Image: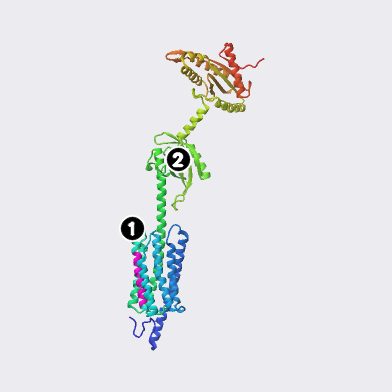
Amino acid sequence: MFPSGQRARGCGVTEGGPEVSSATLICRGFTLTIIGISLVSMINSMLSLLVLGFLFVNYRDRVTGINYWIYSLMLSIAAFMVSVLRIVLPESLAILVSNALHLSSIILLSEGLARYLSTRFRYRIDLVLIGLAMSGSLFYTLTQPRLQARTIILHGALMLLALRILFKFLKTSVSRQHRVSLIMSLALVYYAAVTLYNLSVAIFAPVPQDYLVGNVYTIIGHIALIMLTALLTYAEVLLVSDKLLHKVIASEQKLNLVFDHSPTPLIVTNFGDGRIYNANASLLKMFGYTLEEVVGKTTMDLHMWADANQRETLLKEIGLKRRLEDFEAVLRTRDGSQRICRLSALVIKLSDEKDLEDYLLVNVTDVTQEVNTREDLKHLATHDHLTGLANRILFYDRFDSDKARANRHRHQLAVIALDLNRLKTINDTYGHPVGDMALVHLANQISGVLRKSDTFARFGGDEFCILLDEIESIDDVNRVVQKILDRVSEPLIHTETPIPISISIGIAMYPQDAETADELIQRADMALYTVKRERQSAFAYFRRPQ
């Protein structure tokens, strides 16, 4: 395999003129090549170490096993350095340490893959192989020094370990249905192939004793190892990327699951044009649509807003604060029914980095029943339960606001006190239910002639009070009073029996007669009692005593 006269130690040559010169040049060429490849190998390893270090620093909390890949590469670099330092270290020590580091390196690579897959690999057979390999290396280093035997043992053990890692890696990946890059499997196959090549070279070709002295076969082996380091690093990077992608997909699936199955109605729209991007099942059920019917359309297209101005107000507030809480709006369902909804919104970015647009996540809560209950309670607190008229509380509240408006516009107010005549007689003759019917009849009759701005209140029993606003003169009051008297002259019909209804009215004016509601009511009552006492008219104005 080598030219005659060349010794098996590599580039060592027999003496002889021209042949010595040619062989020396070849030897020097091999040496320079080995030195150059060694430098490239070191740079390649350091770059790989930097890449793995970056992955570890940034993703160690999301991907396990990267630290073991770093340890594996560091041991490989250390093994290389020890091999180079044979010139200064005791040769036997350097050989044994270098072999131990190579064997430990592949075990750490295996453990990194196991932790990446979140599993445990068994190393009983691997440790036996390493033990046998180190025993052989020890024997052929200290007892019977033979480089070829040591090389065969080392590469044979590395090849078997690489094949075992490949087997465990594929078996675990398939059984757990992991998304595993094919590149790592190919890298392990290549690892086994490189060690098989070096094993073949050790068996069939001379092995140089000196690291810096080699031949074509050893150079090819060194280049293959450089490629192996790069391929392993590339495969590890792909594994990390694959795991991160898998986690992102899993996270998105969980978010989508939470979004779709949330009991709270949710909708996502494009903040720019308002088009619906997504809506969950709760919202679709609330409004009676399918997802296909709403995606790509706007809420205006679907006529969901009972008042479009509310939408404009909502968007304006979100544009200022980038969020909104507890905004009440009336929305329409598909069948046209209206619901009072409380909206909370937040401007968000979607996970797609290419999509730079803003989106609006809106939480929709149906508060129709809550608002109706609230309004019912408010109504009960401010209205008479029998007639539905305002009660004393609401009357006083309306008086304050009407008084302020009257002062601004220089209007007058009229407070009318009235009661139902002969209520006791009706109760005694026909019963209290009919007496209640008479009160309701009176309330309905009078309400029909009053303006919406007027306040008609029942204070209790047969006592009623009316607040007329925007009064210009006494004539305005007289017209209203006459309408009331005309209307209540119509009898209550009970079981085809007409029950005559009559009232007495007392009137006090603001600001002439008094300034406060209590004083005006008191003076209207005084006028009312005058009517009852004198019985000359159905109504009377308050007159100050002379």
Foreground mark, 2 or 1, reads 1
Going 39% across and 42% down the picture, which residue do you hit? 281
The residue closer to the viewer here, 220 or 264, is: 264
Residue 504: x %, y % from top left = 55, 15
Q: Which residues are magenta?
A: 149-166
Is residue 374 visible in this depiction of the protein? Answer: yes
- The reply, left or right, for residue 432 in relation to residue 130 is right
Q: Quadrant of the N terminus?
A: bottom left
The residue closer to the viewer here, 72 or 310, is: 72
Cα distance between the residues tagged 2 and 1: 44 Å
103 inside magenta stretch: no
Q: Secondary structure at mark 2?
A: strand
Residue at image mark 2? 364
Please, is residue 282 above or below residue 436 in the view?
below
| Nearest to N terminus: mark 2 or mark 1 | 1
Residue 155: x %, y % from top left = 36, 72
- The reply, left or right, for residue 283 in relation to residue 317 is left
Image quarter for residue 112?
bottom left
- Give the amino acid type for the residue marked by disc 1 in the picture: Ser
Residue at image mark 1? 175
Q: Are marks 2 and 1 in contact (CB under 8 Å)?
A: no
The residue closer to the viewer here, 1 or 440, is: 440
Q: Secondary structure at mark 1?
A: helix
The residue closer to the viewer here, 196 or 31, is: 196
Residue 438: x %, y % from top left = 48, 17
Image quarter for residue 65?
bottom left
152 inside magenta stretch: yes
**Number of callouts:** 2
